[in-house]
Image (cartoon, rainbow, N blue to C red):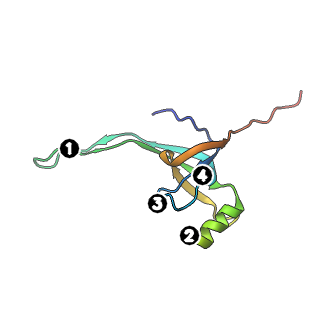
Amino acid sequence: MKKSKYKPGDIVLAKSPAGDCIPAVQVRLIERTYVPEVKDPPFHRGPSIATPEFAWWTAVLVRKEEADMLRKEWSIPFKHPDKMNTSVYERNIVKIVKKRVRKQRRK
């Protein structure tokens, strides 16, 4: 499994795989799923087909305003606070907005 530069709890800016016309939104990463490359056996006389490796994250939208905008302008069914879950391919993550910060314990 390849390492990721993102960690659970990071807030990232993610674009849509549907195109650049849908604006990027901020999401909080929850869990990473990695799928390794798979080589299928060749069909009769044809070449073998390989499925490339990829990774995606289970995520939650951070801002209520972005969920409302996606629902109203693009008819994407996000509703605050119940239905904010989504999934993001790692290749669609633009940048890290805020890294996960651990709270320090008082001594």
Q: Within 10 Å of the Cα at label 4, are there few (<14), some (14-19), or many (20+) other Cα atoms? A: many
x and y percentages locating residue 61 in the rendered image: 64, 56
Identify the disc placed on residue 48. Answer: 1
- Residue that badge 2 annotates: 74
Q: Indicate which label's residue lies in the foreground, 2 or 4.
A: 2
User: Spatial distance from mark 3 to mark 2, Cα to Cα?
Assistant: 11 Å
Q: Which residue is outermost to the front?
A: 21
Q: Residue at x 46, y 60 (%)?
A: 18
Residue under label 3:
18
Write the residue at 75% across / 35% down: 102
Mark 3, other Cα within 10 Å: few <14 / some 14–19 / many ≥20:
few
Q: Distance of mark 3 from mark 4, alpha carbons?
A: 17 Å
* Dot 4 amino acid type: Ala
41, above or below 73, in the image? above
Residue 81 coordinates in the image, percent (x, y): 70, 63
Query: x and y percent of residue 80 in the render?
Result: 69, 65
Residue wearing tag 4: 59
- Snapshot quadrant of residue 103: top right
Label 4: state its secondary structure. strand
State whether residue 10 appears in this view.
no
At numbered mark 2, what does the secondary structure look like: helix, strand or loop? helix
Q: Amino acid at mark 1?
A: Ser
Residue 48 vs 63, above or below: the answer is above
Tell me which label, 3 or 1, sits earlier in the chain.
3
Place of residue 66 in the rendered image (x, y in percent of width and height, measured from the top left): 66, 62
Separation of marks 3 and 1 at Cα, in angstroms: 29 Å
